[in-house]
Amino acid sequence: MTDFGFGLSKSSTINLDKVDTELRQRLYGMEPDLRLCMQCGSCSAVCTAAPYSGMSVRKVIVGLERGVDPRPMLNACMLCGKCTMVCPRGINTRHLILSLCRIYDKEEAK
Ligand code: SF4
Ligand code: SF4
């Protein structure tokens, strides 16, 4: 094969019709404030774990919409609560992370 010095990236297209929304709906049930998120990124900007792990509450929330497993990021969270203090929508993001962990714990215990 000819090497042109560049390659085409794998398509990042997401088929939203195939995304499993059950987890998201369960989380909305536990954390109704999640619907208020405006994706401003303030929570991610102050995150203690972000420089070492790429943790981002905003990415977790967007990922849930798109069917991306957030567990690697959740494991990095130190539950310091800084993200909750800066959220302009008053979302308890720390509690949101805990609720998400509880959902996954229950799934894994089955
Ligand atoms: S609670 Fe977790 S996500 Fe929020 S700022 Fe702290 S380490 Fe980051
Ligand atoms: S700070 Fe609040 S509104 Fe902004 S992205 Fe994070 S959760 Fe959403």
Image (tube, grey):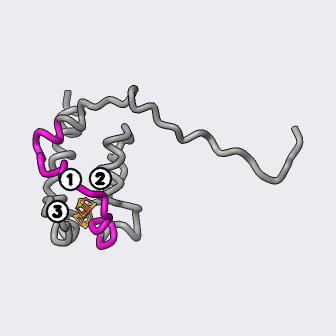
Q: Residues within 10 Å of mark 2 (few under 14, many from 20)?
A: some
Which amino acid, mark 1? Ile
Q: Residue at x 36, y 54 (%)?
A: 59
Prevailing secondary structure class for the magenta stretch in the rendered image: helix
Q: Nearer the viewer, mark 1 or mark 3?
A: 3
**In the figure, residue 51 lies in which quadrant?**
bottom left
| Label 3 C-beta lies within 8 Å of the nearest ligand 2 atom | yes
Is 48 situated above or below 61? below
Screen quadrant of the N terminus:
top right
What kind of element bears circle 3? loop
Which residue is disc 3 drawn over? 89
First in sequence: mark 3 vs mark 2: 2
Which residue is disc 1 drawn over? 97
Read off the magenta span: 26-46
Q: Position of residue 106 (x, y in %)?
A: 17, 35
First in sequence: mark 1 vs mark 3: 3
Mark number displayed over residue 53: none
Q: Residues within 10 Å of mark 3 (few under 14, many from 20)?
A: some
User: Residue 41 lies in magenta, yes or no?
Assistant: yes
Q: Residue at x 40, y 26 (%)?
A: 18
Q: Position of residue 101 (x, y in %)?
A: 21, 46
CB under 8 Å between discs 2 and 1: yes
Q: CA distance from mark 1 to mark 3?
A: 16 Å
Q: CA distance from mark 2 to mark 1?
A: 7 Å
Is 41 situated above or below 66? below
| Label 2 C-beta lies within 8 Å of the nearest ligand 1 atom | no
CB under 8 Å between discs 1 and 3: no
